[in-house]
Amino acid sequence: MKIKGIFRRKSDALDKQQHRRHMLYTWGRRSWSIIRGVIIAGICFLIIYPTLVKLSVSFMPEKDIYDVTVRYVPKSPTFENYKTVYKAMKYPTAFLNTLKLCALTSIMQLISCTLIGYGFARFKFRGRNTLFALVILTMIVPPQTLMLPLYLHFQSFDIFGIISAITGGKGGIRLLDSYWPFILMSATGMGLKNGLYIYIMRQFFRGMPKELEEAAYVDGAGMLRTFVQIMLPSAVPGMVTIFLFSFVWQWTDTFFSNLFLQNTKVLASALSNVTFEITQDIYRETGVNVALSPAISSMYSNTASLIVILPLLILYLFAQKRFVESIERTGIVG
Amino acid sequence: MKTPAMTGKALKAAAVPKKKKKGLNLSRKRAMMGYLFVLPFIIGLITFFMVPMVKSVIFSFNRLDVVEGGYKLTPMGLENYRKMFFSDVNYTRNLTDALLYMVTNVPLILIFSFFAANLLNQKYRGRSLARAIFFLPVILTSGVMLVVESGDLLQSSYGIAQPDTQEGAFRAVELARLLLQTRLSTRFIDYIISAVDRIYDIVSMSGVQILIFLAGLQSIPPSLFEASNIEGATGWENFWKITFPMVSPLILVNTVYTIIDTLTNSTNAVMDQIDTVAFGRMDFGLSSAMALVYFFAIFAVVGIVVWLVSKLVFYYE
């Protein structure tokens, strides 16, 4: 009896201790989840806030901008800004040009970087490490270093004098103002930030189990067939990631598009010139040479940047699920 | 008695080269396939990287004039380099500014992206929404968007911190007061406050880094955590003894990526200057020289950092 009593008391104390510990634990967890929620909400707000500001400004008429009582909600919302900007940017043509350019380059980059990444990940050949170091080197070199030679290169494009031999010594062909510079550079893994894509794909393929391929070889599939039928379907998440990256970065790139496309308008270059184009439009209509005030030109460029980014946001909305999913499977390990 | 042994030996002798040859063939075949897969890169490397690079070096020692149907080079020796360092007022200052900006920003971006990746890796409701929003800056602040946003009047009047304006809702005045009372060194406090002030810059430059860290976090085998939990390790210990070493290779990767990203950003003053010298002043030789020096500076920085960080990296295998 006595022994039993002691035993019970002891276990009661133990229970109490355990209970306290448990309470501490759950409270700790609960407070952490509240703090975490606040932090995440804060960062999300920080990210979205500038775009919300842009959105509210884009609906303001000129007088609302100067009105101190107007902060976020315009007093008399208007679509005028959108109309002006739409016209000044020649949006439909610029949009189609950009879409064509981005679709072409990102598909080419997708193909080339997947192939190159697989080559680096799964095959042993002499000079592999040196070549891969060169991939990193292409990332380090600022595009400005290569811009002049590339410009001149595409001004009269030639491969070892073959083309000039065919055309009869007139020099190469002019590829500027066409999509060819982009296609050629993307197909050879030299486009915008392609070093990063090659790196991502290489890590992706390295993270896949070797047994997958070995099984395919044992079953008598060749190397090409193994790649196409076994490896590619499993690499889709990684490919979605680099496709999205290359599409987005090409869409907003002004460097290469200003360099190679001088007469073809794309959205990015239209955006950087939008205020100039608007003054030109006003001049054409009224014959008056006006200078836009800083606030107004800022309003126009914010509105313009919204309609430039809108297609990307729609794309992201659709690709987002695959993209976020893909992270769980990318398995990038240095 | 001798004959079977002989034949055995002969057989062995015949078999060995055959086997060896076959093995060599396979590995050679795989090597050939490897070259085939990498071939596009080799072509691109030569035509769109090495040749332009060599040309750029040649241009930097010359004066380049655009003439009818091409260009003309006039040798100038080291004149362009002399001009860049000794008579151009902006170049060296821009260069040091860019490097300083990089040195202050890279640690902040790395810490933030690692923290954010850890947040996004935990389980809670609305996680996929949070992830979708955290990667939005990859779209929202890429290329031309960043150029439009930087120094934009309305954006700064709405309190989105701009590097060169003094006002804004996100300015950390209260925090500054609080920190000044702790009597830490003022330089440290300045750094913290400037970090808080530039939080939007830092968040918007962390998209890719978060992605890479998150992928790394998810590739840590869960069994490691299970084992350490059974041994009674706390979350804190788990973090430093498992999570941190396991993602340390990615710290190296992200450091290199962040350095390159901040230094080759389109809003960078040096990049801007190289552009204007080439297409504004039409001084192509000088522009090539500037670009080359800048490249070597980046190369040196990346080299030093890789050497330093790679000592801390732990490879699990």
Image: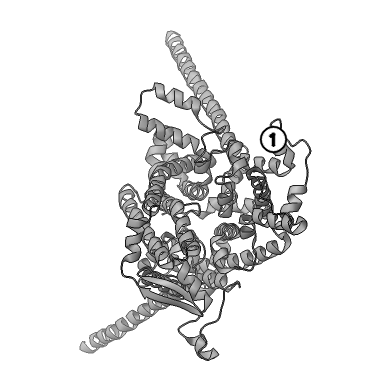
Q: From the viewer's side, name the closer residue of B70 and B308.
A: B70
Q: Position of residue A324 (x, y in %)?
A: 59, 50
Question: Measuring 45% from the left and 83% from the top, which residue is drawn there?
Answer: A160
Per the image, label 1 sits on a secondary structure element best described as loop
**Relative side of A60 to A160, left or right:** right
Q: How is the image coloured?
A: one colour
CA neighbours of label 1 inside 10 A, class few (<14), some (14 to 19), many (20+): some
Task: State the quadrant of the C terminus of chain A.
Answer: bottom left
**Relative side of B173 to B83, left or right:** right
The answer to which quarter of the image holds residue A64 is top right
Q: From the viewer's side, name the closer residue of B211 and A191.
A: A191
Question: Measuring 52% from the left and 70% from the top, which residue is drawn there?
Answer: A185
Q: Please state the total of marks drawn on the protein image.
A: 1
**Relative side of A252 to A311, left or right:** left
Q: From the viewer's side, name the closer residue of B51 and A83.
A: A83
In the rendered image of this protein, does residue B100 appear above or below residue B84? above
Seen as rendered, the residue at the extreme left is: B2
Q: Position of residue A71 (x, y in %)?
A: 68, 33
In the rendered image of this protein, does residue B295 appear above or below residue A54? below
In the rendered image of this protein, does residue B223 appear above or below residue A165? above
Disc 1 target residue: A72
- Circle 1 chain: A
